Amino acid sequence: MANSKKLQDLLERLREALRSEARFREMVETHVDPMCRILTDGTITYANRAFCAVAGLTAGELLGANILAPAPGVQLLERLPCFGPGSPSAIIENTTRFPDTPSKWIQWHCSAFALDGSVMEIQIVGRDIGAQKSAEEASRLAEARYRRLAGNIAEMVYRCDEAETGSLTFINEAAEALTGYGPEDFYADPELGLKIIDPDDREKIRSVMVSDLANWDTPLQLRVRRKDGLQAWIELKMIAVLDKSGRVSGIEGIARDISSKKDSGLMPGDGFQLGPHGYRLIAEASPDYIYILDRADRVLYVNTALAKLFHLTPAEMRGAAWKEFLSAETYECQRAVIEKVFSTGEPARFESGSALGGDDSWEDTRLVPLLSGGEGAVQAVLGITRDITDRKDLEDIFRTAGENFQMGIYIRQEGRIVYANSFMTKYLGYSREELGARSMLEFIHPDYRQKFRENNRKMLRGEIASPYEYRVITKSGHVRWLLESVVPFFYQGRAAVLGNVNDITRQREVEQLLIRVVRGRGENILLINDDFIGGDIVREILEAFGYSVLFAADVDKALDLYREAAAGIDAVVINRIKSGARDLVQSIRRINPDARIVLSSDIVNGGGVAPAPTQSNIEFLAARIRIALDVGKKN
């Protein structure tokens, strides 16, 4: 009766193991991501259905083949993953190649299973990143277009993210024409911008930086020493970049060469007061549309650029009503803002698609009150309009692309989210309005914020190329895993960061599930390890995994234990033995031909001596035991 009950228990455990194996295999087999396992030389030992579909081969054709060249004309990986100390995972991105079939961009997540410090097997999970690569290429093209626009501006445009040090993060090619130094010179020497300014003029910059922000809009006239040793005059305008607390965290600005005007006495400075004719010369030389309107809506002044737009001369426009030159829609849009400037005395700025240049143009308009009289009444309004159609077209192209790519896309400026596509709102659970002007760090799990900052900074500097992972907390309080790449970007004429994001939460959950399914279910294990201390550590960890472990420190003891309890031992694990491993296996087979035997990597390779055990090595050993028990194959 006792033997019958034990046999029934063994049969039930076998059926449960088979059911568990079936559930596990069905889950992995039906997973949408391609998954496989390989040996360190690239030999494929397992491939699920999705992997077979990607490779275009059957499981029978893949098993035993090399993943670098599984079949003629087929290439899945260009190289095998490399794992360093403390780095049990790696990410590889490459294009696959197939005969007569378009290639795909695949991102492979590789996890090493090691035993005694040696990688024995590698698990690989793939993800199609074709859409992400297309988005990165679109971003690269958009960035190149923005940089071309900045490169074609005659004025020097610059940005520094550290206001106190003046370290530049961007400067356009116009810097070389202005100073003789190219962008690479400014990047190599963070203090070059201050060094070339005349020592007597440096105090002007310091005075602005410690003054109220209202004073920052006043252009500074400075002398600089060019690379060729000559002195030049520049007009420098600084714009403060504020952080969340309202403190100055960076500076953006523009500088132009005014040497010729300074030498001719047309620019104010050194006690010289510019007369009206000098200002008129500046307005006439500007490519912007400049005009002055009085309260009765009459044109008091227009520059040549604006008169040419209407195929008139400035004299023909002076004295006429402003609305005679605009469409009804454009006039109504402008008139409401102009009246507000007259009534409040405050300047205004707006962008309009119903523009001076026509309905197909976009323009940026600034309206400034002109005051006179002792009471400071607004007598006229100065308008300055600039064509920004090219910039708007690029922004429209970007938005269209961003909404159609199947991934999260967002733009940060000064640390805050200024654009997020629908997938980004889905990942975080917040609407665009809720994300607007909030810091990306607000959504990142506290444990990952510092690592996010470091990886983000390194990728923007070109120090790393592989996407990095972090966890976020959604609006509903759930934790999700995101995989991100970032590139420097220009948005609305200003430096920004473009982020491309994929949700890898399900992949992480699958990886965790794969770890959980290797746990024991109370099976009896005979562990053989001739290092008593190391073997005792292995025994304790295997017991923590849920196995019941008998321990033998030598071959003779192992055989005695197996003879006494062979019927109750579910598997024999030979983890370390100096010699006689194969003889021991044969002796156990003579006692029980169906014995399940798991050999360590060193014994398989004929070495027989393993280094000190580690947690990850024993976890891999537990996985091998689980496979031997569930599948029931001899090893």
Image (cartoon, helix red, strand yellow):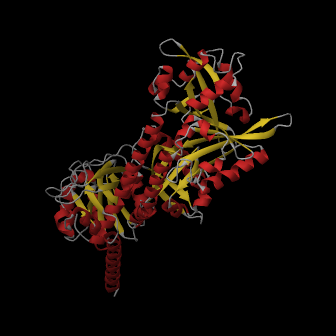
Q: In the rendered image, which quarter is residue 304 located in?
A: top right
Q: How many marks?
A: 0
Image side of residue 140 versus residue 377, left or right: left
Q: Report whether residue 86 is seen.
A: no
Point out residue 614 in the picture as x, y percentages from the top left corner.
40, 50
Towards the viewer: 164 or 269: 269
Image point (36%, 49%), residue name? 90
| Farthest-out residue, front | 316
**Along the line of sight, the residue nearer the viewer: 531 or 559:** 531
Vertical relation: 296 (above or below) 506: above
| Image position, residue 188 (x, y; %) | 47, 25
Is residue 313 shown left or right of residue 631?
A: right
| Screen quadrant of the N terminus | bottom left
Observer able to see residue 152: yes
* Residue 280 vertical placement versus 441 (above, below): above
Viewer-nearest residue: 406 or 28: 406
What residue is shown at x 61% (from left), y 18% (from top)? 262
Is residue 96 shown left or right of residue 359?
left
Look at the picture and state if 594 lies above or below 587.
below
Q: From the top left corner, tell me how far across and down residue 89 is, in percent.
A: 37, 51
Quadrant position of residue 518? bottom left
- Residue 474 at x, y = what percent? 57, 62
Instruction: Give the residue furthest to the left.
Output: 72
Seen from this angle, which residue lies furthest top?
Answer: 229
Q: Residue at x 60, y 28 (%)?
A: 282
Instruction: Name the quadrant of the C terminus.
Output: bottom left
Furthest residue toward bottom: 1
Which of 36 and 71 lies nearest the eye of the viewer?
71
